[in-house]
């Protein structure tokens, strides 16, 4: 390339180059801007879709809770359209409803759906529901194995409670006592409220020297409401 001798020649060269190349440059900029707008529009669309799916899931969960299997027709339709985390969350609620009604084979179908279509966030909950189903259908060893495979510390209190239920079903009151005590201790350590149901379960198998669960809960509430020292 020739060396430009002065500023005038440089300006002329720039004008000539721009004249020859402005169209492809302008087109590239336009494509880039359009792509950016498209990405943002798509992200906004995804967010809107997620919000809609979350709200629909919430509504159907409430229907399943209040109406039971009478709400399954609409819920099943939602599952067909949402083989994702939203459908999986709803499927677990449907499975729990069926387990309460001792319809174990039907419940297993929804548990499988949740396991196959949910994310890693759903897997621990799926295992909890599966263990409860196995325990209530008499598959005690399988239920214990399912609970033993649950490694997420956030679900250990629930796992201990279910383990207590299974042991009590087998007539092992001492084992159930220890499992319920562990569940209560885990709730205390995490500063979580001990449910009335867990309190009743523990007090049902209480042993000499134990502090009743309702008293533990009352002390926990009192401790949380103590005003800060001046």
Image (tube, helix red, strand yellow):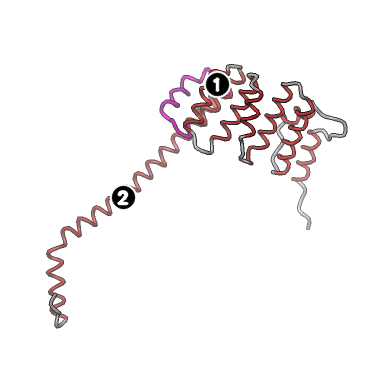
Identity of the residue drawn at 23% across and 54% down: 30
Above or below — where is 34 with respect to 219? below
| Residue 107 tag number | 1
Identity of the residue drawn at 74% across and 39% down: 185
Residue 197 location (% of width, % of height): 71, 28
The residue indicated by pointer 2 is: 37
Task: Look at discs 1 and 2 and give the one toward the viewer.
Answer: 1
Identity of the residue drawn at 68% across and 36% down: 157
Residues rendered magenta in the picture: 64-86
Q: Is residue 207 left or right of residue 89?
A: right
Which image quarter: residue 49?
top left
Quadrant of the snapshot with the N terminus: bottom left
Identity of the residue drawn at 24% across and 57% down: 29
Q: Judge by depth and name the residue closer to the eye, 148 or 177.
A: 148
Q: Is residue 65 magenta?
A: yes
Count neighbours of disc 1 (C-alpha within 10 A) and say few if under 14, some if 14 to 19, many if 20 or more. Answer: many
Residue 94 location (% of width, % of height): 54, 24
Q: Is residue 192 magenta?
A: no
Residue 145 location (% of width, % of height): 63, 30
Mark 1: secondary structure: helix
Above or below — where is 93 with respect to 17? above
């Amino acid at each position: 390339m020739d060396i430009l001798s002065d500023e005038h020649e440089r300006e002329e060269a720039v004008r000539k180059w721009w004249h020859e190349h402005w169209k492809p440059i302008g087109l590239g900029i336009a494509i880039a801007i359009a792509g950016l707008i498209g990405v943002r529009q798509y992200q906004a669309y995804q967010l809107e879709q997620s919000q809609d799916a979350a709200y629909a899931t919430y509504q159907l969960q409430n229907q399943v809770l209040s109406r039971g299997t009478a709400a399954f027709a609409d819920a099943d339709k939602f599952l067909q359209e949402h083989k994702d985390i939203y459908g999986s969350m709803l499927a677990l609620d449907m499975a729990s409803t069926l387990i309460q009604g001792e319809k174990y084979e039907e419940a297993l179908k929804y548990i499988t759906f949740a396991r196959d279509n949910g994310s890693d966030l759903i897997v621990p909950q799926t295992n909890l529901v599966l263990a409860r189903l196995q325990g209530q259908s008499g598959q005690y060893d399988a239920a214990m194995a399912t609970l033993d495979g649950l490694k997420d510390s956030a679900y250990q209190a629930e796992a201990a409670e279910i383990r207590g239920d299974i042991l009590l079903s087998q007539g092992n009151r001492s084992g159930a006592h220890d499992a319920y005590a562990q569940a209560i201790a885990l709730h205390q350590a995490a500063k979580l409220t001990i449910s009335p149901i867990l309190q009743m379960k523990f007090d049902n198998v209480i042993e000499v020297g134990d502090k009743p669960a309702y008293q533990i809960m009352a002390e926990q509430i009192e401790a949380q409401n103590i005003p800060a020292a001046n």
